[in-house]
Image (tube, rainbow, N blue to C red):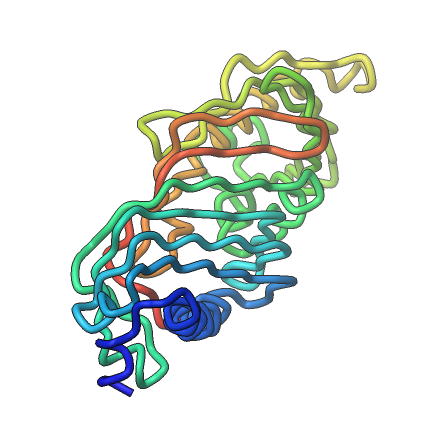
Protein backbone atom coordinates (compact mmCIF):
# COMPACT_ATOMS: atom_id res chain seq x y z
CA UNK A 1 0.00 0.00 0.00
CA UNK A 2 2.70 2.47 1.00
CA UNK A 3 4.78 1.73 -2.09
CA UNK A 4 1.75 2.18 -4.27
CA UNK A 5 0.91 5.50 -2.67
CA UNK A 6 4.38 6.94 -3.15
CA UNK A 7 4.51 5.95 -6.80
CA UNK A 8 1.01 6.93 -7.84
CA UNK A 9 0.88 9.87 -10.23
CA UNK A 10 -2.25 9.45 -12.31
CA UNK A 11 -5.74 10.69 -11.57
CA UNK A 12 -7.01 7.21 -10.72
CA UNK A 13 -4.54 6.89 -7.85
CA UNK A 14 -5.35 10.35 -6.60
CA UNK A 15 -9.05 9.43 -6.65
CA UNK A 16 -8.25 6.37 -4.55
CA UNK A 17 -6.47 8.45 -1.90
CA UNK A 18 -9.24 11.00 -1.82
CA UNK A 19 -11.91 8.29 -1.58
CA UNK A 20 -10.14 6.74 1.39
CA UNK A 21 -9.95 10.09 3.17
CA UNK A 22 -13.55 10.92 2.27
CA UNK A 23 -14.75 7.64 3.77
CA UNK A 24 -12.79 8.02 7.01
CA UNK A 25 -13.70 11.70 7.38
CA UNK A 26 -17.39 11.07 6.66
CA UNK A 27 -17.58 8.34 9.28
CA UNK A 28 -15.74 10.46 11.82
CA UNK A 29 -17.83 13.61 11.34
CA UNK A 30 -21.16 11.77 11.20
CA UNK A 31 -20.51 10.55 14.74
CA UNK A 32 -20.19 14.13 15.98
CA UNK A 33 -23.95 14.54 15.73
CA UNK A 34 -26.75 12.90 17.68
CA UNK A 35 -28.59 12.52 14.37
CA UNK A 36 -27.91 13.45 10.77
CA UNK A 37 -29.93 13.26 7.59
CA UNK A 38 -26.86 13.47 5.37
CA UNK A 39 -23.16 14.17 5.83
CA UNK A 40 -20.85 14.54 2.84
CA UNK A 41 -17.11 15.15 2.93
CA UNK A 42 -14.88 16.12 0.01
CA UNK A 43 -11.13 15.94 0.51
CA UNK A 44 -8.76 17.08 -2.22
CA UNK A 45 -5.15 15.88 -2.29
CA UNK A 46 -2.91 15.96 -5.35
CA UNK A 47 -0.61 14.23 -5.85
CA UNK A 48 -1.77 11.48 -3.49
CA UNK A 49 1.82 10.90 -2.35
CA UNK A 50 1.35 13.94 -0.11
CA UNK A 51 -0.86 11.75 2.07
CA UNK A 52 2.27 10.12 3.48
CA UNK A 53 3.30 13.48 4.91
CA UNK A 54 -0.24 14.06 6.10
CA UNK A 55 -0.80 17.02 3.80
CA UNK A 56 -4.11 17.62 2.01
CA UNK A 57 -5.08 20.55 -0.20
CA UNK A 58 -8.57 21.21 1.11
CA UNK A 59 -11.29 19.70 3.25
CA UNK A 60 -15.00 20.42 2.76
CA UNK A 61 -17.92 19.11 4.77
CA UNK A 62 -21.63 19.64 4.19
CA UNK A 63 -24.49 18.19 6.19
CA UNK A 64 -28.26 18.47 6.51
CA UNK A 65 -30.67 17.60 9.29
CA UNK A 66 -27.96 17.66 11.95
CA UNK A 67 -28.81 17.38 15.65
CA UNK A 68 -26.24 18.66 18.16
CA UNK A 69 -26.38 17.67 21.83
CA UNK A 70 -29.70 15.84 21.27
CA UNK A 71 -31.83 19.00 21.16
CA UNK A 72 -30.38 21.50 18.69
CA UNK A 73 -31.43 20.98 15.09
CA UNK A 74 -29.26 22.49 12.36
CA UNK A 75 -30.97 22.53 8.98
CA UNK A 76 -27.70 22.80 7.05
CA UNK A 77 -24.04 23.18 7.99
CA UNK A 78 -20.94 23.42 5.83
CA UNK A 79 -17.30 24.29 6.35
CA UNK A 80 -14.25 24.33 4.12
CA UNK A 81 -10.54 24.60 4.92
CA UNK A 82 -7.47 25.37 2.87
CA UNK A 83 -4.44 23.10 3.27
CA UNK A 84 -4.60 20.90 6.38
CA UNK A 85 -2.01 18.71 8.12
CA UNK A 86 -3.39 15.37 9.30
CA UNK A 87 -2.01 12.21 10.90
CA UNK A 88 -1.83 9.76 7.99
CA UNK A 89 -1.21 6.81 10.29
CA UNK A 90 -4.50 7.54 12.04
CA UNK A 91 -6.30 7.61 8.67
CA UNK A 92 -5.10 4.07 7.92
CA UNK A 93 -6.65 2.94 11.20
CA UNK A 94 -9.94 4.65 10.39
CA UNK A 95 -9.46 7.85 12.43
CA UNK A 96 -9.08 11.51 11.51
CA UNK A 97 -6.63 13.51 13.63
CA UNK A 98 -5.21 16.96 12.97
CA UNK A 99 -1.49 17.60 13.38
CA UNK A 100 -2.15 21.26 14.11
CA UNK A 101 -5.19 23.54 14.60
CA UNK A 102 -6.84 24.98 11.52
CA UNK A 103 -9.61 27.36 10.50
CA UNK A 104 -12.50 26.75 8.14
CA UNK A 105 -15.02 28.98 6.44
CA UNK A 106 -18.38 28.04 7.96
CA UNK A 107 -22.04 28.46 7.04
CA UNK A 108 -24.97 27.41 9.21
CA UNK A 109 -28.70 27.49 8.50
CA UNK A 110 -31.25 27.21 11.32
CA UNK A 111 -34.93 26.79 10.54
CA UNK A 112 -37.70 28.53 12.43
CA UNK A 113 -38.94 25.10 13.54
CA UNK A 114 -35.47 24.13 14.76
CA UNK A 115 -35.13 27.35 16.75
CA UNK A 116 -38.47 26.75 18.45
CA UNK A 117 -37.46 23.18 19.25
CA UNK A 118 -34.29 24.49 20.90
CA UNK A 119 -36.35 26.54 23.36
CA UNK A 120 -37.51 23.25 24.89
CA UNK A 121 -33.95 22.05 25.54
CA UNK A 122 -32.79 21.88 29.14
CA UNK A 123 -29.73 23.97 28.30
CA UNK A 124 -32.13 26.79 27.35
CA UNK A 125 -35.04 26.32 29.76
CA UNK A 126 -32.72 26.49 32.79
CA UNK A 127 -32.35 30.20 32.00
CA UNK A 128 -36.11 30.74 31.69
CA UNK A 129 -37.91 28.88 34.48
CA UNK A 130 -38.12 29.33 38.28
CA UNK A 131 -36.27 32.65 38.15
CA UNK A 132 -35.79 34.42 41.46
CA UNK A 133 -34.00 37.62 40.46
CA UNK A 134 -35.36 40.59 42.47
CA UNK A 135 -36.61 42.45 39.39
CA UNK A 136 -39.01 39.58 38.70
CA UNK A 137 -40.00 38.54 42.23
CA UNK A 138 -40.97 42.12 42.94
CA UNK A 139 -43.59 41.74 40.23
CA UNK A 140 -44.78 38.29 41.35
CA UNK A 141 -44.93 39.09 45.05
CA UNK A 142 -41.92 36.99 45.94
CA UNK A 143 -42.64 33.79 43.99
CA UNK A 144 -40.35 32.44 41.20
CA UNK A 145 -41.26 33.52 37.67
CA UNK A 146 -41.11 31.26 34.60
CA UNK A 147 -41.22 32.14 30.89
CA UNK A 148 -42.90 29.32 28.98
CA UNK A 149 -44.45 28.44 25.60
CA UNK A 150 -41.89 30.54 23.75
CA UNK A 151 -42.47 30.74 20.02
CA UNK A 152 -40.19 32.49 17.53
CA UNK A 153 -41.39 33.84 14.19
CA UNK A 154 -38.64 34.90 11.78
CA UNK A 155 -39.30 38.18 9.98
CA UNK A 156 -37.55 40.12 7.23
CA UNK A 157 -34.45 42.28 7.74
CA UNK A 158 -33.09 40.44 10.78
CA UNK A 159 -36.24 40.87 12.85
CA UNK A 160 -38.15 38.24 14.76
CA UNK A 161 -41.31 38.07 16.80
CA UNK A 162 -41.26 36.45 20.23
CA UNK A 163 -44.48 35.09 21.74
CA UNK A 164 -44.39 33.70 25.27
CA UNK A 165 -46.23 33.34 28.56
CA UNK A 166 -45.06 34.49 31.97
CA UNK A 167 -46.12 32.29 34.87
CA UNK A 168 -46.04 34.21 38.15
CA UNK A 169 -46.72 31.07 40.21
CA UNK A 170 -49.77 32.73 41.74
CA UNK A 171 -52.33 31.42 39.27
CA UNK A 172 -51.89 34.30 36.84
CA UNK A 173 -50.50 33.74 33.33
CA UNK A 174 -49.40 36.85 31.42
CA UNK A 175 -49.20 36.73 27.58
CA UNK A 176 -46.13 38.39 26.02
CA UNK A 177 -45.47 39.54 22.47
CA UNK A 178 -42.65 41.63 20.98
CA UNK A 179 -40.61 42.19 17.85
CA UNK A 180 -36.82 42.33 18.18
CA UNK A 181 -33.71 42.76 16.07
CA UNK A 182 -31.23 39.88 16.05
CA UNK A 183 -27.51 40.50 15.39
CA UNK A 184 -24.00 39.20 16.04
CA UNK A 185 -21.83 40.65 18.81
CA UNK A 186 -18.12 39.96 19.29
CA UNK A 187 -18.41 37.14 16.76
CA UNK A 188 -19.76 34.70 19.34
CA UNK A 189 -22.89 36.22 20.89
CA UNK A 190 -26.33 36.46 19.37
CA UNK A 191 -27.92 39.69 20.59
CA UNK A 192 -31.61 40.52 20.83
CA UNK A 193 -32.03 44.28 20.67
CA UNK A 194 -34.62 47.03 20.34
CA UNK A 195 -37.67 45.17 21.70
CA UNK A 196 -40.92 46.61 20.41
CA UNK A 197 -43.64 45.43 22.76
CA UNK A 198 -46.96 44.42 21.20
CA UNK A 199 -49.97 44.74 23.51
CA UNK A 200 -52.95 44.55 21.13
CA UNK A 201 -53.65 40.90 21.97
CA UNK A 202 -53.05 41.34 25.72
CA UNK A 203 -56.06 41.95 27.99
CA UNK A 204 -56.10 45.59 29.03
CA UNK A 205 -55.78 44.75 32.73
CA UNK A 206 -52.52 42.88 32.05
CA UNK A 207 -50.88 45.28 29.61
CA UNK A 208 -48.69 47.15 32.06
CA UNK A 209 -47.28 43.99 33.65
CA UNK A 210 -46.96 42.36 30.21
CA UNK A 211 -44.79 45.24 29.04
CA UNK A 212 -42.56 45.00 32.12
CA UNK A 213 -42.18 41.22 31.83
CA UNK A 214 -41.54 41.43 28.09
CA UNK A 215 -38.63 43.78 28.70
CA UNK A 216 -37.30 41.38 31.35
CA UNK A 217 -37.51 38.46 28.90
CA UNK A 218 -35.76 40.54 26.22
CA UNK A 219 -32.85 41.15 28.59
CA UNK A 220 -32.62 37.46 29.46
CA UNK A 221 -32.54 36.45 25.78
CA UNK A 222 -29.92 39.08 25.00
CA UNK A 223 -27.57 37.57 27.59
CA UNK A 224 -28.33 33.91 26.92
CA UNK A 225 -27.06 32.88 23.48
CA UNK A 226 -23.29 32.54 23.64
CA UNK A 227 -21.98 30.14 21.01
CA UNK A 228 -19.30 28.81 23.35
CA UNK A 229 -22.09 27.03 25.26
CA UNK A 230 -23.05 25.07 22.15
CA UNK A 231 -19.64 24.28 20.63
CA UNK A 232 -18.51 20.77 19.89
CA UNK A 233 -15.46 19.75 21.89
CA UNK A 234 -12.41 21.08 20.06
CA UNK A 235 -14.38 23.25 17.61
CA UNK A 236 -15.34 26.90 18.17
CA UNK A 237 -17.70 28.70 15.82
CA UNK A 238 -17.18 32.41 15.19
CA UNK A 239 -19.70 34.49 13.25
CA UNK A 240 -19.19 37.42 10.93
CA UNK A 241 -22.82 38.00 9.97
CA UNK A 242 -26.33 36.63 10.12
CA UNK A 243 -29.52 37.28 8.21
CA UNK A 244 -33.11 36.13 8.15
CA UNK A 245 -34.30 34.64 4.87
CA UNK A 246 -37.85 33.38 4.82
CA UNK A 247 -38.22 30.82 7.60
CA UNK A 248 -34.45 30.38 7.98
CA UNK A 249 -31.77 32.14 10.00
CA UNK A 250 -28.46 32.05 8.10
CA UNK A 251 -25.05 32.43 9.76
CA UNK A 252 -21.69 32.84 8.07
CA UNK A 253 -18.29 32.93 9.72
CA UNK A 254 -15.49 30.53 10.48
CA UNK A 255 -14.72 27.56 12.68
CA UNK A 256 -11.59 27.31 14.81
CA UNK A 257 -10.79 23.60 14.80
CA UNK A 258 -8.27 22.52 17.41
CA UNK A 259 -9.01 18.83 17.04
CA UNK A 260 -11.68 16.58 15.60
CA UNK A 261 -14.11 15.83 18.46
CA UNK A 262 -14.72 12.23 19.40
CA UNK A 263 -18.50 12.58 19.79
CA UNK A 264 -21.39 15.03 19.87
Q: Position of residue 214 (x, y in %)?
A: 61, 23
Quarter of image, res 106: top left
Q: Is residue 7 left or right of residue 246?
A: left
Residue 137 visible at all: no
Q: Which image quarter holds the N terminus?
A: bottom left
Q: Position of residue 69 (x, y in %)?
A: 50, 62
Quarter of image, res 173: top right
Residue 146 versus residue 27: which sits nearer the camera? 27
Residue 70 visible at all: yes
Note whether 44 is above or below 103 in the view shown: below
Note whether 77 is above or below 156 in the view shown: below
Q: Position of residue 176 (x, y in %)?
A: 70, 26
Residue 257 versus residue 85: which sits nearer the camera? 85
Residue 103 versus residue 206: which sits nearer the camera? 103
Q: Residue extending furthest front?
A: 10
Q: Which residue sits at x=55%, y=29%?
A: 217
Q: Which image quarter holds the C terminus?
A: bottom left
Q: Which residue sits at x=44%, y=68%?
A: 22
Q: Position of residue 86 (x, y in %)?
A: 23, 66
Q: Which residue sits at x=37%, y=55%?
A: 59
Q: Which residue sits at x=50%, y=17%?
A: 193
Q: Is residue 202 left or right of residue 50?
A: right
Q: How many marks?
A: 0
Q: Is residue 209 left or right of residue 106?
A: right
Residue 74 versus residue 16: which sits nearer the camera? 16
Q: Is residue 27 left or right of residue 229?
A: right
Amino acid sequence: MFGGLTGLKDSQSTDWGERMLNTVASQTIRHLFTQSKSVEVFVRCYPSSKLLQGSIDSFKMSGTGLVIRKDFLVEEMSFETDAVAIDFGAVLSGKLNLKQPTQAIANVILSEAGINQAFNAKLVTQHLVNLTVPSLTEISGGTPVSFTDIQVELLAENHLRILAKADLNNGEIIPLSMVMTVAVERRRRISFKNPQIELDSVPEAQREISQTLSMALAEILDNMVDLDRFDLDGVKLRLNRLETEGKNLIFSGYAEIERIPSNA
